[in-house]
């Protein structure tokens, strides 16, 4: 996604340079300055769009009920319970699911050869299940 955005930005900057030159900018320097300003504005907008896309979308259960917690919050609950910080674990993964009508997050991670698995209630933050297996 980011590569496509950057590729589009580069194409747009080149187009702006050509238009600026065709419009009679008195120097290439002025055209480059104008293109740099436009590129900066485009990059800021692209960053805003990317940030919005990366923000957790609140999953919705089939009943139409939106989960009260985000995936990041569920991961934090699991890590706190296990006594770790995100930088102390590897392969931190989470997924939203509805099991028998209960919205929940499945959170998994590894630490020092052990696999930790958690099921977190997506509304209350309660730990429904957890397991620790030696890999």
Image (spheres, grey):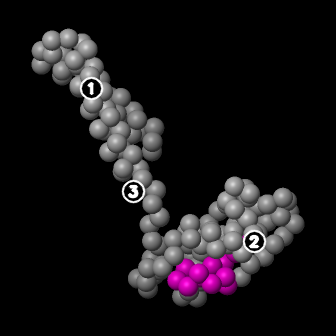
Write down the residue under mark 2: 82
Instruction: Please name whichever residue, 5 or 78, is drawn nearer the observer in this view of the structure.
Output: 78
The single residue placed furthest to the top in the displayed view is 27
Q: List x then y, in percent, for residue 79.
A: 69, 68
Q: Which callout, 2 or 1, points at the residue further toward the start of the chain?
A: 1
Report, in whole angstroms, how far the alpha carbon at label 3 lies from the one at label 1: 25 Å
Write down the residue under mark 3: 52
At mark 3, the secondary structure is helix
In the image, what residue occupies the spot 39% across and 46% down?
47
Q: List x then y, in percent, for residue 127.
A: 67, 82
Q: Quadrant of the N terminus?
A: top left
Residue 88 marker? none
* Residue interval drawn in magenta: 117-128
Q: List x then y, in percent, for residue 118.
A: 70, 75
In the image, what residue occupies the spot 64% across and 74% down?
77
Q: List x then y, in percent, for residue 41.
A: 29, 38
Does the magenta run of residues contain 121?
yes
Q: Nearest to the eye among marks 3 and 2: give it.
A: 2
Residue 35 marker? 1
Q: Is residue 34 left or right of residue 107?
A: left
At mark 2, the secondary structure is helix
Q: Are marks 3 and 2 in contact (CB under 8 Å)?
A: no
At mark 1, the secondary structure is helix
Instruction: Please name whichever residue, 132 or 1, is drawn nearer the observer in this view of the structure.
Output: 132
Does the magenta run of residues contain 75?
no
Q: Is residue 127 left or right of residue 51?
A: right
Query: Please, is residue 7 above or below residue 120 in the view?
Result: above
Neighbour tally class for label 1: few under 14, some 14-19, many 20 plus, Cα within 10 Å: many
Neighbour tally class for label 3: few under 14, some 14-19, many 20 plus, Cα within 10 Å: few
């Amino acid at each position: 996604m980011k590569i496509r955005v950057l590729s589009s930005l580069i194409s747009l900057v080149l187009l702006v340079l050509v238009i600026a030159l065709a419009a009679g900018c008195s120097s290439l320097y002025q055209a480059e300055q104008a293109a740099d300003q436009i590129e900066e504005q485009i990059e800021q907008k692209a960053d805003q769009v990317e940030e919005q896309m990366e923000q957790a979308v609140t999953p919705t259960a089939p009943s139409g009920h939106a989960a009260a917690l985000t995936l990041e919050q569920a991961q934090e609950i699991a890590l706190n319970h296990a006594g770790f910080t995100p930088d102390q674990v590897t392969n931190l993964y989470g997924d939203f699911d509805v099991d028998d009508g209960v919205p929940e997050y499945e959170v998994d991670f590894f630490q020092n050869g052990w696999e930790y698995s958690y099921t977190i209630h997506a509304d209350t933050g309660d730990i429904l299940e957890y397991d620790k297996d030696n890999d």
